[in-house]
Amino acid sequence: MKLLKYAIAWMLAATMLHSSLAAEPVPEHIGQEVPQARIAGKGSFRWFGLKIYDAKLWVGDKGYQVQAPAAAPLALDLRYARSLQGKKIAEASEDEMRKLNLGSAQQRANWQAAMEKIFPDVSEGTHLTGVYLPNQGARFYLNGKFLGEIMDSSFSHAFFAIWLDPKTTASELRTALLTNAGPRP
């Protein structure tokens, strides 16, 4: 009987999470880039206890497939909880790519330079959205307005791996982002 109560509570919690993820309207810039966009999951990134940003992963009807991560476009929206310099965001991104052993040292240096040109300084409440374009590259938006793009498929793979690779340093956030990431039935 106790097991049945736990199973019912778990199913109710999963249903509530699914409906809360599905209920949010799709921002226009995400809807234009990711057909039939829906939130796959969301979570917060903290560094030594300080909240840095809240993240939402938007996927289309194909979802996100761990075994085929390049199969469909997706968008990762970060809402910053504090002020950060764009240059520091680019440096931290390169550092995470290096930790994942993605790209050569020269590639990462080129990617960091490209990110430094695109990424602005942010303050509390700022939204930066990265859109993964399979086999093409990535586009970036600031509060829904186009910032720029890096059309290099190796870059886009490495950049989104920061959050989605199984070896990410933010494994709890990865789990939260992929909560409902499978394809639509």
Image: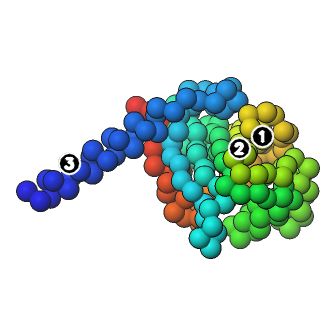
Asked which colour scheme the image uses, the reply is rainbow
Is residue 10 in view?
A: yes
Left or right of 160? Residue 40 is left
Between disc 1 and disc 2, whose residue precedes? 2
Q: Which amino acid does label 3 sit on?
A: Ile
Question: What label sits on residue 172 in the rendered view?
Answer: none
Residue at far bottom of view: 48
Locate residue 126, reporting x and y percent: 73, 46
Q: Is residue 145 above or below residue 117?
A: above
Image quadrant in which the C terminus is located: top left
Closer to the camera in the image, 167 or 40: 40
Q: What residue type is labelled 2?
A: His
- Disc 3 crowd, CA 10 A, few/some/many (<14, 14-19, 20+): few
> Which residue is found at the position 46% from the left and 34% from the top?
22
Locate residue 80, reporting x and y percent: 69, 52
Q: What element carries label 3?
A: helix
Name the residue tied to disc 2.
Answer: 127
Q: What residue type is labelled 1?
A: Leu
Q: Is residue 86 above or below residue 137?
A: below
Q: Is residue 89 above or below residue 49?
A: above
- Disc 2 crowd, CA 10 A, few/some/many (<14, 14-19, 20+): many
> Which residue is found at the position 46% from the left and 39% from the top?
21
Between disc 2 and disc 3, whose residue precedes? 3
Locate residue 18, reporting x and y percent: 40, 40
Closer to the camera in the image, 46 or 153: 46
Instruction: Compute the Cα span from label 1 to label 2.
Output: 6 Å
Name the residue tied to disc 3.
Answer: 8
Name the residue tied to disc 1.
Answer: 142
The residue mark sitting in front, 1 or 3, is 1
